[in-house]
Image (cartoon, rainbow, N blue to C red):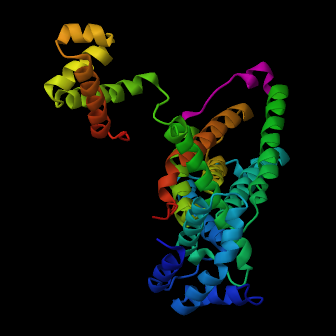
Amino acid sequence: MAGTEGEWEAWMAAAQGGDARAYDRLLRACLPFLRAVVRRRIRDTAEAEDAVQDALLTIHQLRASYEPPRPIRPWMAAIADRRAIDRLRRHGRRQGRETPIDEFGETLAAPAANVAEERLDQARLRAAVAELPQAQRTALALAKLEDLSLAEASARSGMSVGALKVATHRAVKALRRRLGGAGE
Amino acid sequence: MRTEDLIGCLASDLRPVRRLPSPAAQTAIWLAGAVVAIGAIVLAEGLRPDLMQRLTLPQEGLQWLGAVATGATAALAAAMLARADRSARWALLPLPFALAWLATLGLGCLADMARMGEDALAPRLSGGCIQFIIFLGVPLGAGLLLLLRHAGPVRPGPVLALAGLASAALCSAGLSLFHHLDASLEVLLSHGLAIGAVALLGRVFGRGLLLRTPVAP
């Protein structure tokens, strides 16, 4: 809603006197105008809408400083532009302080930051292994962790090669299930 | 919160407001207050006996007018810049007057050199001048900032600096009415330092006197 010449100014003058209906009409009418001003600086839709809301709050706060019958559009545009610049500055400062973790997947930028996560994973793995039945635990330890051949593992554990194969397979499957991986 | 809902809240909370006076009227109100405050101190201290004789000298008369004009135009520029729709170029308004003021002080230094020789260029500071300008300039500047507190969400930086310049320049002009320094360089250094200090204090501590910028929840 563009409004006829002088209509917005008359609504604001009425709003200064306390006319809530004129004020509501003005703010709804000027919304596309404020959005257009803000979008000249901010492309991100959500960020731009936040700046528009900041501009509306500022217009509300400063409504006593509007001087009718001066054109109200330059007044509103200057306020919206300032709020857009403020949002961009805040956004810039935030970006300077933060590292977006999405781009790095599971790895954080600082190597030291990964230590805690690795420790957590190790603890979960140990707990999951501890819950396996004895035979599966032994088979897993010899065949996968100590990397022995099936014959060597069989000689060390006293289990048959077939029993070792089955126990190792079941142990891996159980761990996958418990640690959130897809089962076979 | 959706923007349409925010508009509903703002409209339903609307209270009538008293429209602010125009920037020119705000400047006039502040200037009147500043003249009363500075004038009261000048009268209490007593005018310099040689005042009329000094002010009729072109260089000293122009110097005094330069300080007054710098203060008045800086106050008007601050009041204009506090309004969102006024041009940022208003900040340049006091510049020619400030330059003219500096030029008359520079000419004064040259005249002093011709009169007093190299002694005129010895760097001296007047503690009394600096104290007067700072102690009176700070409250006057604070008064102007309170009058222009709507500048906070619009253009706080230039308004803070101009308010400091306005009040300090007027204090400097007031000081010249009852206190005379022999050397222009001493005036330049003492008044310049004090004006810079008031402008800096305004820039650093004045922000709290202005309205805070609202941020959407």
Residue at 73% x, 72% y is: A74
Q: Position of residue B34 (x, y in %)?
A: 58, 61
What is the chief secondary structure element of the magenta stretch? helix
In this orientation, which residue lies closer to the viewer: B56 or B203?
B203
Magenta residue check for B91: no
Q: Residue furthest left?
A: A134
In this orientation, which residue lies closer to the viewer: B4 or A180?
A180
Q: Can I make out residue B167 in this image?
A: no
> Which quadrant: the C terminus of chain B?
bottom left
Residue at 53% x, 79% y is: B4
Q: Position of residue B112 (x, y in %)?
A: 79, 30
Left or right relative to B6: residue B185: right
Q: Is residue A100 above or below residue B44?
A: above
In this orientation, which residue lies closer to the viewer: B139 or A86?
A86
Residue at 27% x, 7% y is: A152
Left or right relative to A159: residue A35: right
Q: Position of residue A108 (x, y in %)?
A: 46, 31
Q: Which residues are magenta?
A: B116-128
In this orientation, which residue lies closer to the viewer: B51 or B183?
B183
Residue at 35% x, 30% y is: A117
Residue A2 falls in image quadrant: bottom right
Q: Can I make out residue A68 in this image?
A: yes
Count of numbered circles in the view: 0
Q: Is residue A105 above or below residue A110?
A: below
Magenta residue check for B127: yes
Q: Position of residue B1 (x, y in %)?
A: 46, 71
Q: Is residue A122 above or below residue A142?
A: below
